Image (spheres, grey):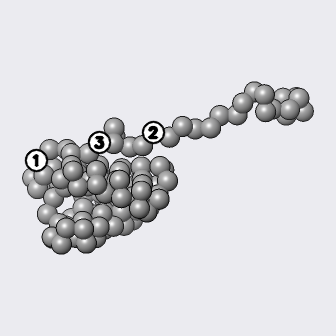
Amino acid sequence: MIEDFKRYLKINGVSKVTIKSYILKIKEYIQWYQESFGLEFSKLYRENVLDYLSYLQTVKKNNAKTINTKVSALIKFNEFLCECCIQEKMIINKNDRIRIQEQLVSPTKISKQEVE
């Protein structure tokens, strides 16, 4: 299944670096799934994906950006599974990403010299 996913990504014009990253992240998910449930991976289930994201946040202490890259890989993997008729519908989407508040520079913290 992983090799088929890799071919799917290549056909869809995904860069080599992104392919390598996605494959690694999907392998991590499948390993977590198999260790957690003692079952062979066959398809994605929403409740399992949500458990995985919670595990990444609370147990692994991954930051939001790291988790979001894993969500992106899972979204693409979900698309692949749907296209191959392994999965009936999308169970994960962009709304599952963690919102990241970018810290903006406060005008009170800028010195007169920096302004000039």
Measuring 48% from the left and 50% from the top, which residue is drawn there? Answer: 65
Judging by the rendered image, the residue that carries numbered circle 1 is 88
Q: Amino acid at mark 3?
A: Asn
For the residues labelled 3 and 1, the Cα–Cα distance comes to: 14 Å
Measuring 13% from the left and 52% from the top, which residue is drawn there? Answer: 87
Res 80 visible: no
Circle 3 or circle 2, nearest the eye? 2
For the residues labelled 3 and 2, the Cα–Cα distance comes to: 13 Å
Residue lying farthest right?
Answer: 113
Within-10-Å neighbours for mark 2: few <14, some 14–19, many 20+: few
Check the image and report above or below for 107 versus 57.
above
Nearest the eye: 80 or 42:
42
Residue 102 percent across, percent down from the top left? 58, 38
Residue 79 percent across, percent down from the top left? 22, 49
Judging by the rendered image, the residue that carries numbered circle 2 is 99
Within-10-Å neighbours for mark 3: few <14, some 14–19, many 20+: some
Measuring 79% from the left and 33% from the top, which residue is drawn there? Answer: 109
